[in-house]
Amino acid sequence: MDMQEEIEGLAILIRDLRKHKNLTLGELAARIGRSVGFLSQVERGLSKPTVADLTAISETLGVSTTYFYSLEKPRALPWVTRPGERRTLYYAGGITDVLASPSMSAGFSMLESHLAPGATSGEGHLNDSSEQGGFVLEGQLSIWLDDQPEPVTLGPNDSFQLPPHSQFRYANLTDQPARVLWVFR
């Protein structure tokens, strides 16, 4: 799939899940603190949500954020993924997540996040029900945890682990790209 097909696939998953949960655009928009117009554009594949937006959507609709990677691509081996077989989500804010896990039904999932210079997860803190951690492969990742005014900045080979429902946000505050391997459970 190309980028536009991936964006449209995400749009369909969000819209179908919202309708399955019997929520109107207005109800979901109010619960995630965004406008109906913005959410409508996301559901039509015209706008990309931020990581914070998609996390809020998943929590409101009662699914893990990994749910949105469920449009799996065909693979030669069910326990292996190769670069061309991976599902990709393109977020507003300069972040691209690639599902590295062969299966989402296992005990954990892995994502490779690419953060463009200045990329951010969004203005609000994430509150994901998943336990998660990460390993910085390249560049720098800054994380604000809870109400800390200053972020902790991680570089290559640094790692972190956050319990479920941690209040955090993250960004690449540099002028160089960053790559992070995320693990969700």
Image (tube, rainbow, N blue to C red):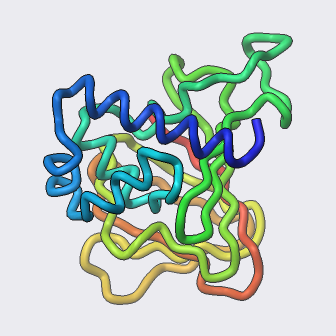
Q: How many numbered marks are there? A: 0
Residue 31 place in picture, x, y as percent: 16, 53
Using the image, determine if residue 89 lies above or below residue 118: above
Query: Looking at the image, which residue sits at the far top?
Result: 77
Say above or below: 33 vs 68.
Answer: below
In which quarter of the view is residue 122 placed?
bottom left
Residue at the image point whose x is 50% and y is 59% from the top: 47
Which residue appears at 21% of the width and 27% of the height? Answer: 21
Residue 80, x across and y down, in percent? 79, 20
Q: Position of residue 95 (x, y in %)?
A: 61, 63
- Residue under the image location 15 percent in, 57 percent down: 30
Question: Picture quarter containing residue 176?
Answer: bottom right
Q: Which image quadrant: the N terminus? A: top right
Q: Is residue 30 above or below residue 125?
A: above
Q: Report the front residue among 176 and 15.
A: 15
Quarter containing the C terminus: top left
Question: In the shown orientation, is residue 22 left or right of residue 67?
Answer: left
Question: Residue at coordinates 28% horizontally, 34% vertically from top-left?
Answer: 18
163 w.r.t. 18: above or below? below
Residue 70 location in percent, x, y?
54, 26
Q: Nearer the viewer, residue 25 or 73?
A: 25
Foreground pick, 133 / 176: 176
